[in-house]
Amino acid sequence: MRYLVLLIVRNAFRQKLRTVLTVAGIIVATVAFGLLRTAVDAWYGGSEAASATRLITRNAISLVFPLPLSYRNKIQQVEGVAATSYSNWFGGVYISEKNFFPQFAIEPRSYLKLYPEYVLSPQEKRAFFKDRRGAIAGRKLAETYGWEIGDVIPLQGTIYPGDWNFVLRGIYEGTSEKVDQTLFFFHWEYLNEKLKQVGSERTDHVGIYVVGLENASQAAEVSQAIDDLFENSLAETLTETEKAFQLGFVAMTEAIVMVIEVVSFVIIIIIMAVTANTMAMSARERKQEYATLKALGFPGSFIAMLIYGESVIIAMTGGLLGLFFLYPAADLFASKIGTFFPVFKVTQETAWLAIGVALLVGLAAAAIPAWRGATIPVTEGFSEIG
């Protein structure tokens, strides 16, 4: 066995330039495949971080239509509801439109109680609660723009026109890497007061209600009870789990996700063809060697093993080196895209998938050359000698 492995390794690197170029191609393909798979994972990141004990209640017609603030007390009375809060999407512009990050007007105490994964120090939390113009931001968002506590954050309103200035009172951390740290929260009351001053129709209306459940198993019953409560009203509701709510946004961009997935598998097919060509060239060049081995009594399975081993070593070398470069490439990509993806991390599943794909490429690329090498007649192999 030792000599067999030694022979396979030497065969793999006999044509050094060809092997190096093939390995380089597999490295590039592995990094590209890993980045694309990570992008798909990041797209679903919000739904994976969703809590099973929270429901989202929105206007049944569309998310752009608000709900009356008076609904909160009625929702709170539904059996199985432990707590409620609410928020409004703000949609402001920070300096320029390219600086996009999600902004929400919230009722601070009840909202942060329902989202314990946003961790603030007691001092920051108290400062945020006391200051009507106060705001909090995720660690990643604050680091992106170099914000520090006490900074004034100016936003140009789009849905709610005007200049809005908030004082950063806290920077929250996530309890895990999956927690979105690119969000910006401020007081809903501050927003509502401004709307009252201009006589807006959106006064005393909220975008969504967040409903905390006493028991996650009651999600379906509580959702139906809430929606039944407001049936045939001026603003009927649609209540769903937080995960279903998040997946609804993903569904809007399903075509993009599908294209990314297709491209990632096209990359695999291309690199499989490149490796197969390498192995086919190698097998053609060694016809005489295979014929000699057969003449000496080695079976066809031994020759097939040589070819498969050589192909797998080349593919796995490229795959492992590609995985080595994937992590810094993902970090670099994440730093360039800013807050577009809240979480952009290479998961263990993606790493194992990349290794599995490299192994698959090695095995598939060797299939035809191994069959040809194992079945080649001795006379045909010697026919080209001299």
Image: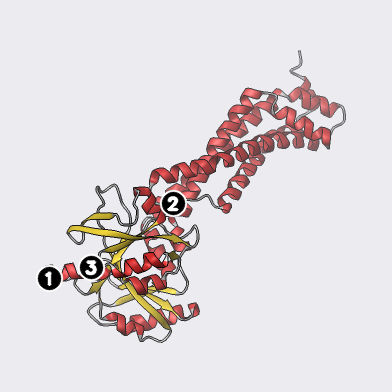
Q: Is residue 326 above or below residue 190?
A: above
Q: Is residue 222 left or right of residue 360?
A: left
User: Which of marks 2 and 1 precedes in the sequence?
Assistant: 1
Q: Amino acid at mark 3?
A: Tyr
How far across and how far down the image is residue 360, in percent?
63, 44
Residue at 41% over, 55% down: 139
Numbered disc in front, either 2 or 3: 3
Q: Which mark is residue 69?
A: none
Q: Judging from the image, what secondary structure is the residue with disc 2 in?
A: helix
Q: Is residue 248 above or below residue 222?
A: above
**Which image quadrant is residue 92 in?**
bottom left
- Name the image quarter holding the N terminus: top right
Numbered disc in front, either 1 or 3: 3
Any part of residue 265 in sight: no
Density class for disc 3 (Cα within 10 Å; few <14, some 14-19, many ≥20) is some
Give the CA distance from mark 2 to mark 3: 41 Å
Q: Is residue 162 above or below residue 302?
A: below
User: Which of marks 3 and 1 precedes in the sequence?
Assistant: 3
Any part of residue 233 in sight: yes
* Furthest residue toward left: 198
Q: Amino acid at mark 2?
A: Met
Q: Judging from the image, what secondary structure is the residue with disc 1 in?
A: loop
Residue at numbered disc 2: 258
Q: Amino acid at mark 1?
A: Gly
Residue at numbered disc 3: 190
User: Which of marks 3 and 2 precedes in the sequence?
Assistant: 3
* Furthest residue toward front: 123
Give the CA distance from mark 1 to mark 2: 44 Å
Residue at 78% over, 35% down: 5
Q: Which mark is residue 199?
A: 1
Observer-nearest residue: 166 or 246? 166
Residue at 33% over, 70% down: 108
